[in-house]
């Protein structure tokens, strides 16, 4: 019998590995039906694309800006604009690294009514906008000047980058022919009860900011005690005082509300979270029963006396344990996916599955390698078991708490941009968080916020290097130790 | 052939070397007894030769292959039965044999046939599909012996294999060792049962506090200190005593003469005494045991 085959079978059929497989499957059976019952089947994507249109005498030029909940640009977002009346026009553009995309729509061959439908989808499985109505100016009408942006300003809300409990005003503004805006003035007034149908006199409002760039995040000094039913009036004027935009916004817009995710994305998060937590434990247990226990108890000597080197045994057992846990993980995911299909009549996204499997493979290899290192350094089964438990607690189970303590130590608010940076930076130093890095890359999402991963240092290159490092470094260290220590 | 050259092992600098400059050979067709007190370094020496412990210095070669640098080739030529066999307990004996056979590159069908044959030869027929955890200590030793013979190695390391065995087991291993010698295998046998070592060994290596004290052949052992020859004569006079003084130190009690330090053939003494005209009523000859000699050596060393 090929020794590796025997070792794979031994690791795969170890009680610990089988128990965790069953545990994950039981959790899936218990939780997925609850997710189905508790979630809406209709996605409610956040609106986070601003745009402006100009009439350029031959057609319409449209400038898009895609941004996340912090107002940061999102690159690679694919925008599909199709006419409300079928067949009039269709165009596609993708945002650049600054979040901008430009599109040109020739005048339609027939006069259209006021609205055209734009379907906006990124190149991921997340929707950032759907069923948008973009108001194009009616061509050849006297009330539209060529080259003038319409609308010249779009106002939205974003999460404050330093304090996630604060909602800021996001202003997207363009000048003529899509130049930068020329010193616009942004006014706001203290919230007041609804019922006022016209904006208050400008003299009663407060100048909040001067707008000189395309994208601007402006903090509105709204008291925390404000009644959410109150209204907030804002007004943008040019520097000569002419009004560009007057808008009234409910104060509730400046209070944070969670969006209800759809069932399949929540299920995906649940499964990846469950696997991300328990697969490292499975790897630790398999490494213990497949190598560590034999090593510290002396059982491995009955193999070492055979014509094989210490390194040969270590590599053979390493391959066997990693393969066994990877196989167990694959089987578990497939069973969970079958359950998802049964309950939700959908399957998990293939790219999500492949990404999860790949990142879990890295986690398995890393934890097995670390356990192999500990196996070389400990002299008793008790010490090895204790080290394995400690490894699981620190790097896996209590990791979120440790990160929270680290964030608390820096004095920044939870959920803030700085906190997210700390969270991502620390993830590079923990193999159990590798799946999080891959998901940031795949979903362009972090803690529910759409982000541009590169801004957090998460790129295919950095994640690839981290993955390779987690596979190779523990293995190389354990190979070094096994050659020098009895 | 096993060759130990200046082998030293230091587990911890605080407690000094477990063995120091150990050098000796175990030639083909030879059984070498390895004798020493507990903690003398016997097991450490054997474990280094088995390739499960690194030597700190020196070299062990197995049929010319270095056990550290040429581990794979050396290990093909060696079989090791430790004092306390330690192997996977939850596996069935036959499965483990097949697993070990994989390391020797033996094809599965041939490995199964060979494993069943070896398990039968070692007295484990009928229990080969039982988990090893259910085996007695003697059965575990027999299993490890069977596993050690998978590659029909030229060299064997037996570390206290007679410990904990019943008389039948001791008899089995004794006959096995003699059989291996007849097959021109090299056998290093460590044991506390010195009478067995004395009976089985062609040479005996004495180790004390990690150092080799003496290496002796069986002939040297029996002849070095001489035995005690006791004669009971019809007449004890100066003439016969003068002769007997030439072959050892005398102690006379009435008609009984004890000659200690005697090295030679007692029957020749008997013939000479009778030729001189004396009648030998009784003759006995006693050589010191290995145990006595070993304790004497240890006493001198301390």
Image (cartoon, grey):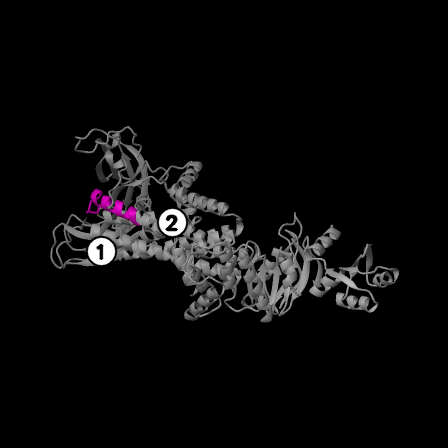
Crowding at mark 1 (Cα within 10 Å: few <14, some 14-19, many 20+): some
Q: Nearer the viewer, residue B293 or B65?
A: B293
Q: Give the mark, 1 or 2, whose residue is nearer the N terminus.
A: 1
- Report the chain holding disc 1: A
Is disc 1 placed on a helix, strand or loop?
Answer: strand
The magenta stretch spans residue A32:
yes
Q: Nearer the viewer, residue A207 or B158?
A: B158
Residue shown at 85%/62% (left/top)? B240
Rendering coords of residue A97 (x, y %): 34, 53
- Which portion, as a residue range, is magenta? A25-44
Residue B150, visible in the rendered structure: yes
- As drawn, the label of residue A80 is 1
B269 sits left or right of B16 in the view: right
A419 sits left or right of A477 in the view: left
Q: Looking at the rendering, in which quadrant would you find the N terminus of chain A?
A: bottom left
Is disc 2 placed on a helix, strand or loop?
Answer: helix
Q: Which residue is mark 2?
A: A455
Residue shown at 39%/53% (left/top)? A14
Label total for image: 2
Q: Label 1 vs label 2: CA separation? A: 25 Å
- Report the chain holding disc 2: A
The magenta stretch spans residue A144:
no
Residue A437, visible in the rendered structure: no
């Amino acid at each position: 019998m090929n020794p590796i085959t025997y070792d794979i079978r031994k690791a795969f059929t170890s009680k610990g590995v089988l128990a965790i497989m069953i545990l994950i499957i039981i959790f899936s059976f218990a939780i997925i039906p609850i997710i189905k019952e508790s979630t809406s089947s209709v996605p409610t994507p956040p609106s986070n694309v601003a745009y402006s249109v100009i009439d350029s005498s031959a057609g319409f030029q449209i400038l898009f800006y895609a941004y996340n909940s912090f107002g940061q640009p999102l690159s690679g977002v694919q925008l599909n604009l199709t006419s409300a009346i079928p067949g009039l026009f269709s165009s596609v553009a993708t945002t650049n690294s600054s979040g901008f995309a430009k599109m040109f729509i020739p005048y339609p061959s027939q006069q259209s009514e006021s609205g055209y439908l734009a379907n906006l989808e990124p190149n991921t499985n997340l929707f950032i906008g759907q069923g948008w109505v973009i108001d194009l100016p009616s061509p050849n009408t006297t009330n539209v000047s060529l080259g003038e942006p319409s609308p010249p300003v779009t106002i939205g809300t974003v999460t404050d980058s330093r304090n996630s409990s604060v909602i800021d005003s996001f202003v997207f503004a363009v000048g003529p022919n899509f130049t930068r805006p020329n010193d616009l003035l942004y006014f706001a007034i203290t919230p007041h009860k609804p019922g006022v149908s016209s904006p208050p006199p400008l003299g009663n409002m407060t100048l909040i900011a001067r707008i000189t760039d395309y994208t601007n995040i402006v903090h509105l000094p709204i008291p925390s005690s404000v009644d959410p039913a109150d209204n907030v009036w804002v007004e943008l004027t040019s520097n000569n005082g002419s009004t560009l935009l007057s808008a009234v916004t409910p104060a509730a817009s400046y209070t944070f509300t969670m969006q209800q995710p759809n069932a399949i994305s929540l299920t995906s998060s649940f499964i990846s979270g469950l696997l991300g937590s328990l697969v490292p434990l499975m790897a630790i247990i398999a490494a213990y029963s497949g190598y560590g226990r034999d090593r510290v108890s002396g059982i491995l000597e009955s193999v070492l006396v055979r014509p094989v080197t210490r390194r040969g045994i270590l590599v053979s057992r390493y391959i066997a344990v990693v393969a066994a846990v990877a196989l167990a993980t694959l089987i578990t995911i497939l069973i969970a996916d079958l359950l998802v299909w049964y309950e939700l009549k959908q399957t998990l996204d293939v790219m999500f599955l492949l990404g999860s499997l790949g990142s879990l493979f890295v986690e398995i290899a890393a934890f097995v390698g670390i356990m192999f290192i500990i196996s070389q350094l400990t002299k008793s089964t008790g010490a090895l078991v204790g080290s394995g438990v400690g490894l699981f607690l620190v790097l896996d189970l209590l990791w979120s708490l440790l990160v929270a303590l680290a964030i608390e130590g820096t004095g920044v608010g939870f959920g803030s941009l700085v906190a997210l940076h700390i969270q991502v930076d620390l993830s590079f130093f923990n193999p159990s968080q590798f799946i999080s890095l891959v998901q940031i890359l795949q979903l362009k999402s972090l803690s529910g916020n759409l982000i541009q991963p590169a801004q957090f240092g998460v790129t295919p290159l950095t994640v690839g290097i981290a993955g390779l490092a987690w596979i190779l470094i523990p293995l190389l260290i354990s190979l070094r130790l096994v050659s020098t220590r009895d | 052939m096993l060759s130990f050259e200046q082998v030293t092992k230091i587990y911890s600098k605080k407690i000094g070397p477990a063995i120091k400059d150990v050098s000796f050979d175990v030639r083909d067709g030879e059984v070498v007894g390895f004798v020493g007190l507990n903690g003398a370094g016997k097991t450490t020496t054997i474990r280094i030769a088995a390739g499960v412990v690194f030597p700190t210095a020196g070299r062990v070669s197995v049929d010319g292959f270095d056990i550290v640098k040429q581990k794979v080739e050396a290990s093909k030529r060696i079989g090791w039965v430790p004092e306390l066999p330690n192997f996977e307990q939850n596996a069935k004996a036959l499965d483990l044999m097949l697993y070990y056979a994989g390391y020797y590159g033996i094809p599965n069908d041939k490995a199964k046939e060979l494993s069943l044959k070896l398990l039968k030869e070692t007295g484990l027929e009928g229990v080969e599909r039982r988990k090893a955890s259910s085996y007695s200590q003697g059965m575990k030793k027999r299993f490890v012996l069977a596993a050690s013979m998978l590659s029909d190695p030229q060299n064997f390391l037996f570390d206290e294999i007679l410990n904990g065995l019943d008389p039948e087991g001791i008899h089995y291993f004794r006959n096995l060792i003699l059989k291996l010698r007849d097959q021109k295998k090299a056998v290093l046998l460590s044991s506390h049962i010195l009478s067995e070592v004395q009976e089985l060994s062609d040479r005996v290596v004495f180790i004390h506090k990690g150092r080799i004290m003496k290496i002796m052949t069986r002939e040297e052992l029996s002849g070095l200190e001489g035995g005690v020859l006791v004669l009971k004569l019809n007449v004890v006079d100066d003439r016969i005593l003068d002769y007997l003084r030439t072959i050892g130190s005398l102690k006379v009690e009435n008609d009984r003469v004890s000659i200690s330090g005697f090295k030679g053939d007692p029957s020749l003494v008997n013939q000479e005494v009778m030729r001189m005209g004396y009648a030998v009523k009784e003759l006995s000859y006693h050589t010191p045991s290995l145990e006595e000699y070993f304790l004497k050596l240890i006493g001198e060393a301390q």
